[in-house]
Image: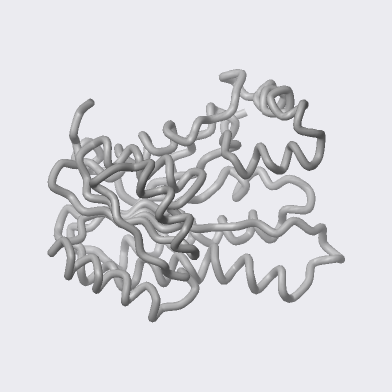
């Protein structure tokens, strides 16, 4: 295993499960000290056990600026540095136009847009030249299924943020990019399929989701993690403001 992040400290929001956990595992495997955030201590404890001794956790809500400022203060106090941030925490409310509620709008944009701002903004003064920020977007920002306008809109906002923010941080030496996955094989996806189609149909459902993909499958969480490692390493030293689609080619067809 190439330890391309050796000596670095990274924060990954929403890191207790799914894509966030896969990213955290890859960061730790590549030598980084990893701090994951999530909403429940019990979930963090399980994730830290899975990641290993280079991981720690902090309960924080990305929609609350005070939580994020406290988390970063903890990181600096414990590790003395911050080198990489992955703004992964996100959610999706599904409702077609005509039935979208105020609560669904507020919750989706609070986490997916305001949560990204509150993850990124307090990190900027702490990151050194060469520091990196990766924001997890989605192919849903450009290929939006029916009923997912809130989710697609919130992820499109992230792309707009980054195009402006790389100009705001000019001269700092910090790089910022968007990583946009397509469908990923996570426990939450499998639970949703089990509820919709029955537990005995989950594997078939996952396979069916990948049939139209040029690769013939959907992603594993560790594949999203590998792309995040690339964008956080010196291998991508002249890449900033980009949106990398890690979706098996679906955004191109």
Res 23 quadrant in image:
top left
Res 190 quadrant in image:
top right
Q: How is the image coloured?
A: one colour
Establish if 156 lies above or below 223: below
Residue 212 in view in this figure: no
Would residue 174 appear left or right of 64 to someone viewing this image? left
Which x, y percent locates residue 43?
Answer: 48, 55
Would residue 131 appear left or right of 117 to someone viewing this image? left
Establish if 68 lies above or below 2: below
- The residue most toward the right is 98
Q: How many marks?
A: 0
Establish if 192 lies above or below 148: above
Image quarter of the C terminus: top right
Image quarter of the N terminus: top left
Which x, y percent locates residue 226?
Answer: 36, 34
Residue 249 in view in this figure: yes
């Amino acid at each position: 295993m190439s330890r391309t992040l050796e000596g670095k400290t990274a924060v990954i929001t929403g890191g207790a499960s799914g894509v966030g956990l896969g990213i955290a595992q890859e960061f730790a495997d590549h030598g980084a000290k990893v701090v994951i955030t999530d909403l429940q201590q019990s979930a963090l404890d399980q994730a830290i056990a899975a990641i290993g001794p280079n991981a720690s956790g902090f309960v924080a809500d990305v929609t609350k600026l005070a939580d994020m400022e406290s988390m970063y203060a903890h990181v600096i106090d414990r590790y003395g540095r911050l080198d990489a941030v992955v703004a992964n925490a996100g959610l999706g409310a599904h409702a077609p136009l005509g039935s979208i509620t105020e609560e669904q709008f507020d919750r989706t944009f609070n986490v997916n847009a305001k949560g990204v701002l509150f993850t990124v903004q307090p990190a900027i003064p702490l990151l050194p030249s060469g520091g990196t920020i990766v924001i997890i977007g989605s192919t849903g920002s450009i290929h939006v299924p029916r009923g997912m306008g809130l989710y697609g809109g919130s992820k499109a906002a992230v792309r707009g943020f980054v195009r402006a923010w790389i100009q705001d941080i000019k001269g700092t030496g910090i790089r910022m990019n968007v990583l946009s996955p397509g469908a990923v094989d996570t426990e939450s996806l499998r639970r949703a399929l089990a509820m919709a189609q029955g537990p005995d149909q989950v594997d078939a459902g996952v396979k069916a989701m990948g049939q139209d993909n040029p690769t013939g499958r959907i992603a594993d969480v560790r594949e999203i993690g590998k792309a995040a490692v690339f964008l956080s390493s010196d291998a991508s030293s002249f890449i900033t403001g980009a949106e990398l689609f890690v979706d098996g080619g679906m955004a191109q067809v």
